[in-house]
Image: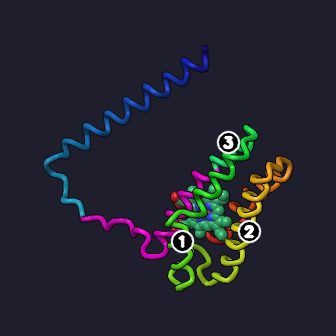
Amino acid sequence: MKRFVKRSLVAVVLVASTAVSAVSFATPPETAPAAAPKAAPAAPTGGNYLLLNEMVLLNKAYRDIISAVVLEDSKGVVDAVEGFETSQVVQMTRDAFKAGKIKTPKNPERMKEFEGMDRDFHNNFDKLRDYAKADNRPKIRYIAKKLLDNCIKCHEQFRK
Ligand code: HEC
């Protein structure tokens, strides 16, 4: 109960401070100097846009996989893996990669290494699908955990 009250207070304070800043935003003082136009943040271009899209999709697929694993729903695991692997974004990213159009935000000069990690990752994804099709639950759990290590390792090296 106490905790709930505390949280509600925090929420009220947050709402109040947002309201205050919204008001001051709406009525700038007459004397305010004209703001210099800000450059828009660079959007990822070309292949990198694809990579980011693939990651967003992968993020969702992996969440679905974790839910299915903990609920012992092997069919759910198969569906999540196949949904990801057959998606157009994954095919397009693969083509862009082959064409040399993908550069990672960090360590872009180490694309060979990135390729190896990506291959490892996709191999584990394939294994997961096969174990899930066979309803081999101990192996499904084992690979699902290994996949998490794949995400973290690659991000350490290649994601800013
Ligand atoms: C082979 C390397 C590699 C693997 C494996 C990998 N990622 Fe990524 N991921 C990246 C890179 C590189 C980026 C940054 C892309 C960019 O900003 O252009 C990224 C970005 C992301 C993002 C977007 C974050 C943001 O900045 O908005 C998410 C979400 C994500 N990855 C989730 C995952 C999950 C979940 C896994 C494992 C199931 C995974 N990734 C595995 C390389 C990888």
Q: Is residue 66 above or below residue 110?
A: above
Tell which residue pokes out farthest to the top in this image. Answer: 1
Q: Position of residue 74 (x, y in %)?
A: 73, 46
The secondary structure type at the circle numbered 3 is helix
Residue 123, disc: 2
- Front residue (pair 155, 19): 155
Q: How many marks?
A: 3
3D distance between C-alphas at marks 2 and 3: 21 Å
Which span of residues is magenta-colored? Answer: 37-62
Residue 67, disc: 3
Q: Is residue 56 magenta?
A: yes
Q: Position of residue 80 (x, y in %)?
A: 62, 52
The secondary structure type at the circle numbered 2 is helix
- Front residue (pair 8, 28): 8
On screen, residue 65 versus residue 30, left or right, reads right
Q: Position of residue 13 (x, y in %)?
A: 43, 28
- Front residue (pair 62, 38): 62
**Residue at disc 3, CB closer than 8 Å to ligand 1:** no
The residue sitting at 31% across, 68% down in the picture is 39
Tell which residue pokes out farthest to the right in this image. Answer: 138
Tell which residue pokes out farthest to the front in this image. Answer: 134
Q: Is residue 148 magenta?
A: no
Tell me if I can see residue 160 in this picture: no
Check the picture and name the quadrant holding the C terminus: bottom right
Q: Is residue 137 above or below residue 58?
A: above
**Residue at disc 1, CB closer than 8 Å to ligand 1:** no
Residue highlighted by disc 1: 91
Question: Three-letter amino acid code at disc 2?
Answer: Asn
3D distance between C-alphas at marks 3 and 1: 25 Å
